Image (cartoon, rainbow, N blue to C red):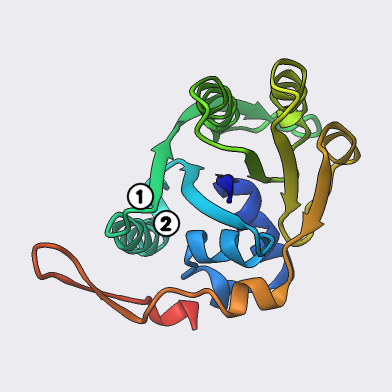
Amino acid sequence: MNRVISYIDGFNLYFGLRAKGWRKYYWLDLAGMSRAVMKPQQALAHCHYFTARIRAGGKSQNAKRQTIWLDALATRDDITCHFGHYLPKEQTCKSCGAKWTHHEEKMTDVNIASQLLVDAYEDRYDTALVVSGDSDLTTPIKMVRQRFPHKRLIVAFPPKRRSDQLRKAAHGHIVIGDDSLRQNLLPDRITTATGYVLERPARWY
């Protein structure tokens, strides 16, 4: 059996879903989605999800919904979440000179690249499924291919996300479609190990 580990770029997937207007798929079973795009002779060894927690601020409801979903994912043995962080960056309007603070997400690309390489060195997968359309991941994919020619790297593009550089660097590519998402949502209610019940946010239906 061919062992597969999926590496999911959380922001790339989220903004792809948002660009399609697919808010109903935010309550996603990431491991199920990974299995949906795999071949019959493959088995999912693990799913790594990379993101950063939304800063509460003026988007407290968004942060609350994200926390509920992340807590739901945490009940699963086949999914591990890895967190980056936000850094403030001052922006200036070129026309009027107005200034404001923009927060940029950091560490996702580095975390994906590190996990991809560590898992290759420790021989944890035969095939790596990289769910992203971010060309910044081209270099780590090339590095794994050069050092581990027997391992395969497949890119799965989220909706509305593409990269010719990624496509050319990998052994193959697929596009995550509506069926792979619609058929792999988490249960509407999930009970944690402590007995607390998590419910799918109303805005995500």
- Residue 105 marker: none
Residue type at mark 2? Lys
Q: Which of 77/64 is in front?
A: 77
Q: Which of 190/83 is in front?
A: 190
Which class describes the residues within 10 Å of circle 1: few (<14), some (14-19), or many (20+)?
few
User: Residue, x 62% and y 67% (percent of image)?
Assistant: 36
- Residue 17 occupies which quadrant of the picture? bottom right
As helix, strand or loop, the secondary structure at mark 2 comes to: helix
Classify 91 as above or below 156.
above
Q: Position of residue 190 (x, y in %)?
A: 27, 74
Alpha carbon distance from label 1 to label 2 = 5 Å
Q: Which of 188/67 is in front?
A: 188
Q: Which of 101/15 is in front?
A: 15
Q: Report which residue position mark 2 lands on.
A: 59
Q: Position of residue 6 (x, y in %)?
A: 57, 46
Circle 1/circle 2 CB separation < 8 Å: yes
